[in-house]
Image (cartoon, rainbow, N blue to C red):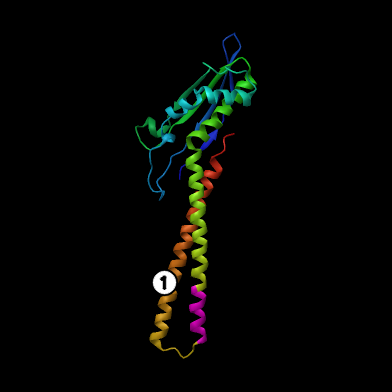
């Protein structure tokens, strides 16, 4: 399951004696997986350049300026991105998406910090939001189907067990047939429970990590 964490690690740095500050937000866009959750796939979230395209867009900068209380055009030329490679990438291993820093500079520290946070939220939503939303919808449908199937299986097991208990005169062959049917139903029950548990666990990942803060 792909995680979509928007971690706004905001801090300010004074640049020289001109009181120009720097605010930085760090985001992780996650690793999308195939429908079965067994393999990684390439998407916008796996390319750090996607974030750069978003945060340098005049439209999204204008949105961030409004959220931060900055004047129109304040962010123009004051936003940049940096890919932060992890340990696996440094060792030459593939399969680990980098973190991305969104850096904003300006003379109003509180406002540029809010702007960096706003751009982080926008980037997470624009790049990974659709994937996460659809993944959540799919998992919810799978969980609902699992619950329906589990109710049906439980009812079949109870029916078979009741049939055995109410017919004391069953032959050995008949009892073996009933036992076989019950055994198959129990195996199906266990598989459905395992599928439901896995889907519920996967559902918690995007819910926890789709919030940028």
Q: Which is the main secondary structure of the residues drawn in magenta?
A: helix
In the structure shown, which secondary structural element does the residue marked by tag 1 occupy? helix
Q: Return the residue found at the far bottom.
A: 169
Q: Which residue is drawn at 38% across and 38% down?
A: 42
Q: Residue at x 46, y 91 (%)?
A: 169
Quadrant of the rendered image containing residue 96: top left
Residue 186, given in percent of the width and then of the height, sits at 45, 70
| Residue 29 position (above or below residue 106) | below
Q: In which quarter of the image is the N terminus?
A: top left
Q: Is residue 160 magenta?
A: yes
Quadrant of the rendered image containing residue 112: top right
Q: Return the residue found at the far left.
A: 92
Whether residue 3 can be seen here: no
Left or right relative to 172: residue 78: right
Residue 67, given in percent of the width and then of the height, sits at 62, 26
Q: Does the magenta stretch include residue 128?
A: no
Whether residue 47 can be seen here: yes
| Residue 4 position (above or below residue 110) | below
Residue 124, given in percent of the width and then of the height, sits at 51, 34
Q: Return the residue found at the far front.
A: 59
Q: In which quarter of the image is the C terminus?
A: top right
Residue tagged by mark 1?
A: 184
First to last magenta residue range: 156-166
Residue 27, given in percent of the width and then of the height, sits at 51, 32
Q: Dot 1 surroundings within 10 Å: few (below 14), some, or many (20 or more)?
A: few
Tally of marks: 1
The residue lying toward the viewer, choosing from 35 and 130, is: 130
Q: Which residue is drawn at 57% across and 25% down?
A: 116
């Amino acid at each position: 399951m792909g995680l979509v964490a928007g971690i706004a690690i905001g801090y300010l740095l004074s640049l020289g004696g001109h009181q120009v500050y720097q605010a930085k937000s760090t985001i992780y866009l996650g690793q999308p997986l195939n429908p079965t959750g067994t393999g990684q796939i390439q998407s916008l979230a796996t390319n750090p350049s996607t974030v750069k395209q978003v945060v340098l867009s005049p439209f999204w900068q204008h949105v961030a300026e409004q959220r931060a209380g900055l004047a129109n055009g304040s962010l123009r030329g004051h936003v940049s991105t940096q890919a932060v490679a992890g340990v696996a990438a440094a060792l030459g291993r593939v399969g680990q998406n980098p973190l991305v820093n969104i850096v904003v500079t300006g003379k109003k520290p509180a406002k540029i910090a809010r702007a960096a946070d706003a751009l982080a939220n926008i980037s997470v939503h624009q790049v990974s939001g659709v994937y996460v939303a659809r993944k959540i919808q799919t998992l919810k449908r799978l969980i609902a189907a699992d619950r329906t199937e589990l109710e049906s299986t439980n009812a079949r097991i109870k029916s078979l067990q009741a049939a055995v208990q109410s017919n004391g005169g069953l032959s050995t062959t008949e009892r073996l047939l009933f036992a076989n049917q019950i055994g198959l139903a129990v195996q199906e029950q266990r598989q459905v429970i395992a599928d439901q548990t896995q889907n519920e666990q996967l559902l918690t990942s995007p819910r926890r990590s789709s919030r940028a803060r």
